Each structure stands twice: as C-alpha cells, then as structure tokens.
Image: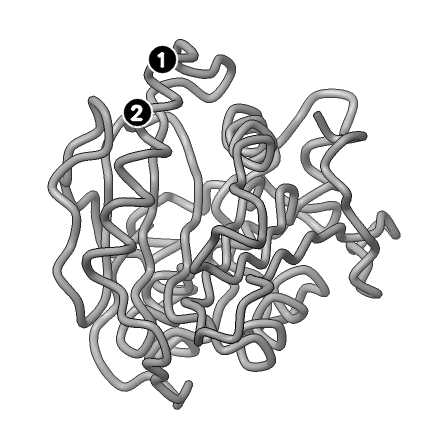
Amino acid sequence: MCQSSQLVQSGARSRQGFPILTRQQAPSSGKEPVRVLLIGGIHGDELSASSAVFQWMQWLPPSTSSALHWNIVPVLNPDGMLAPKPRRVNANGVDLNRNFPSPRWNVEAQRYWVSKTGRDPRRFPGSSPLSEPESRWLSEEIKRFKPQLIISVHAPFGVLDFDGPVQPPVRFGALRLAPIGVYPGSLGAYSGSNVPVLTIELPSAGRLPEPAEMRRIWQDMLTWIEQNIPAGHQVAMTPATGSDSAR
C-alpha cells in the first residue's frame, strides 16, 4: 500500500533523518473544495493508525468526482515506527502529541508530565513546544495548507474524540463519540479552538478492524464531512488561549 500510494517527499525530515512523506489530491473542477489534513503515525507504536491511512488512500475517489482537497501524512513519526521495536516517541524521546504549543504549554506541559504521568518517558512533552522537527513541520503545514478539518488517527481506545467549532460526529462504524481527556501539547489542544480536529481512535494498535468495518468508518467519515464542514470556510490560526483538550 505504501508503494502504491503516490507519496512524495515533503522536504521535511524526522529527527533521525527519515523523510516525511505526503500526498495531495485536489479536485479537478473549479468548485471551492473542503481542505482536509489526514494524519497517521504521530505515535510510532500505533501501527494500525498508519495502516488505516494507507488503506483509505486506496479508496480516494478520483479528483474529477471529489469535493475534497486531501493533504495526507500517513507516518508523521517514522523514527518511532521504524525503530527495531516500534515506540510511541520519536528518536529524541519526545511524544510528538505533547509537543504542540497549546495554551499555557510552558506552565502546564511539564507539570502535567510530572504530576499526572509520573515522568512517563513515553509521554515526555519535550523541552519546549515545537522542539522537534516533526511537530514543527506539521505546525507550519497547518498554517500553509489552511485545512478546514484535521483528522488524526490513533489507537487503541476504540472511540472518536473531537475538538472544534462544528457539530461533532456521533459515530463512524462501531466507533462512538467519547471524549478521552485533557492533554497539554496535544494537536487537538493546539488547533481545535480554530480548526476542527477529529481524532479517530482505532480499537487495536496492532491490528486493523475487519475490511467491512474499515469501509464503514471511511464512508461515515465522508458523509459527516459533506454534511458538517462547509467549503471555503477558513479560520485563521491564532495563538490558542483556551483550555487544553484532546488526545
């Protein structure tokens, strides 16, 4: 699937020097598209997250019949995924999904890591926000691409989580909406106050759902986007000032 996904190098590299690969597919019609940023593999040990993105890339409708402009990053954390034993963090030992500059990061991220996780090395937020090349590139890509929706795929909670100013989905396939916590430095905490961030938590980190369920999740996601994300709507990225939320 990776080899057939028409990926190109973004120009960015991971901490260890692996290229971060992307694929863009824009409608060929002149109609204003909905811009969707789809991300997998923020945590390198959540193998199903990247596998799901690769699977969905096979099902993208042709550009002639799509109303969506896709910007797809199937593996944001190649260091973690390609390690001899896949691991959550990047080569610098940083949890990329705690490294985004959410509100009061400098006050709350380290405090949360110490008091709530007991200095869990799998959840180290880094020495400063956007200290890592992977999170720094994604932050810049969000500003450049200006998505109307960000979809981040994770595992293994088996739910949907959501941050943003539009109506959240109730369910995709068997996955139901169930907010899962407050985490300083997460992508949802960083972007969710301006751009809707949908987090898809698959039920297993090591195995994809059955093909029929994968198809249901995909179709439900497309239907929800069509009904809830207006084309042409833009929300400027500004420094976040609210509370932290999302995975």
Residue reaching furthest right?
17
Q: Residue at x 70, y 25 (%)?
A: 1
- Residue 32 numbered mark, or none: none
233 w.r.t. 40: above or below:
below
Label 1 sits on what residue type?
Answer: Ala
Residue with the mark numbered 1: 212
- Residue 80 spot, x, y in % from top left: 68, 37
Q: Residue at x 69, y 52 (%)?
A: 23
> 117 left or right of 46?
left
> 207 left or right of 244?
right
Crowdedness of circle 2 by 10 Å Cα count: few (<14), some, many (20+)?
Answer: some
Q: Is 37 or 205 nearer to us in this picture?
A: 37
Classify mark 1: helix, strand or loop.
helix
- Residue 71 spot, x, y in % from top left: 58, 59
Q: Is 177 or 56 nearer to us in this picture?
A: 56
- Residue 142 spot, x, y in % from top left: 53, 73
Q: Is 242 or 32 nearer to us in this picture?
A: 32
167 w.r.t. 178: above or below:
below
Label 1 and label 2: CA atoms lie apart by 6 Å
Label 2 sits on what residue type?
Answer: Arg
62 w.r.t. 130: above or below:
above
> 78 left or right of 200?
right
Crowdedness of circle 1 by 10 Å Cα count: few (<14), some, many (20+)?
Answer: few
Q: Residue at x 29, y 54 (%)?
A: 225
Q: In the picture, residue 114 is in which quadrant? A: bottom left
- Residue 110 spot, x, y in % from top left: 43, 64
Classify mark 2: helix, strand or loop.
helix
Q: Are the residues flagged by discs 1 and 2 in contact, CB closer than 8 Å?
A: yes
Residue with the mark numbered 2: 216
